[in-house]
Image (cartoon, rainbow, N blue to C red):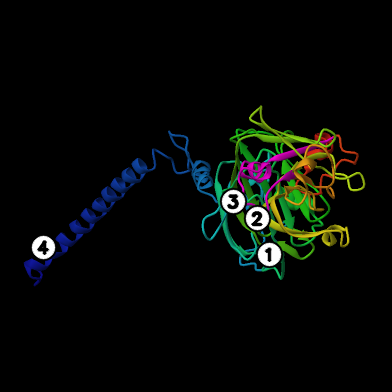
Amino acid sequence: MNGQPISGASVGATGRRGRRGGVRLQALAAGALLLVLTACGGGETANGGGAGGKGPAAQGGGQQENAASQAVVTILPKDGADSVATSGVLKVTAAQGKLTTVTVADSKGTAVEGKIAADGASWSPTAHLAAATQYKVHAIAKDADGRESAKDTTFTTLVPKNTFIGQYTPEDGSTVGVGMPVSINFTRGITDPEAVEKAIKVTAEPSVPIEGHWFGNDRLDFRPENYWAAGTKVTVHLNLDGVEGRPGVYGKQKKTITFTIGRRQVSTVDASAKTMKIERDGKIIKTIPITAGAPSTTTYNGQMVISEKYKVTRMNGATVGFGGEYDIKDVPHAMRLSTSGTFVHGNYWASSGTFGSANVSHGCVGLQDARGAGDSSMPAAWFYDRSIVGDVVVVKNSKDKQIQPENGLNGWNMDWSEWIK
């Protein structure tokens, strides 16, 4: 036994068998792992090919599908910009892609209208921005593979130092006659009339074409080709806030006005016949004897619109170039027809036989009346009570020229072709 314990020999034999067994187990484990990897790899071989024909190239294609969009969105002005001009600055563009969505809104959520170009490369607003207002811009573009790229910015427009507004007629909510234009007088002379007119929209229901016409640089009137139809609803949108009407002078007004056209009343004064026929909705409802302008102070011819009504008012010749020829402190039932002082009004100082037989006024149309405007039976009172601002008074057969369109609300004396130039 060589003096060695029996157990020692047994331990050595076992150790050798254990090592061989370990090799076999490792080989089996490696084989199993290879089978697992082969199954997960879809049968790929060591060189990357396989039954499925997918290798690194295919894996690279999967990564391309998840790549960032190539489209680049640019927004001007830059994020956080302040004192931004209200027009000519805002623009959104896309490179290596096309814009699909652009929204611009103020802090109240009011959107700015705009349009994406046909090629998708740019977006521009179709109207000016408001002054002293913060805007948020959100834009999305897609590249050739349909992948989206988005950008969001915020900017604030300038606070103007010099401003203007438009003083308008008729009044909001009023009912007026068929001759009433929309007339807007600006508190500052306008040197960019196109920008200002673009910011004003006048619509009617039922719809009718309405055009604006400038008288000088501070007055803009709107009207249809012919008198309004009775019952028409007219809406005026004044979106002047932020409009640069002249260099460094911005509008600060945003308002909507509505008014209604009442019944149709057109009265015709025949200065030669010395009568006035009142036509209501196509029918002559009354003929009133009148006195028109004397031979030396004739009455203008033309279509005139009643712009103001006074139950009693003072008329002083000095205010309209007649010196001290007259100063009547209590003229009854006066209705203004021109800025220069033409009225249709009551006359209590002439004899009753004057009306219908002689022209003796200083250019106005006089109707018989009582002092104090208290006698409703008088012709002047009757006409006053049945007239509203916006009614038309046409004067014909006077030995005078036609009234100028800008003298009062009298744009009807301009041909439509000239009006829309």
Q: Earlier in the sequence, mark 2 or mark 4?
A: 4
- Disc nearer the start of the sequence (3/2): 3
Question: Quick one: SS at disc 3?
Answer: loop
- Label 2 vs label 4, nearer the camera: 2
Nearest the viewer among 348 and 328 is 348
Q: Earlier in the sequence, mark 3 or mark 1?
A: 1
Instruction: Give the image quarter of residue 284.
Output: top right
* Pointers 3 and 2 in contact (C-beta within 8 Å): no
Residue ID at (26%, 48%)? 28
Mark 1 and mark 2: Cα distance apart in space: 59 Å
Instruction: Single out the mark in the foreground, 3 or 1.
Output: 3
Q: CA distance from mark 3 to mark 1?
A: 33 Å
How far from the left and from the top, in percent, is residue 381? 64, 45
Is residue 399 inside the magenta stretch?
A: no
Circle nearer the viewer, 3 or 2: 2
Q: Residues within 10 Å of mark 4 (few under 14, many from 20)?
A: few
Of the two numbered discs 1 and 4 in the rendering, the one whose residue sits closer to the viewer: 1
Mark whose residue sits in front, 4 or 3: 3
Give the Cα separation between the discs numbered 2 and 4: 147 Å
Q: Which residue is mark 2?
A: 372
Name the residue that disc number 4 marks: 10
**Amino acid type at image mark 1:** Val
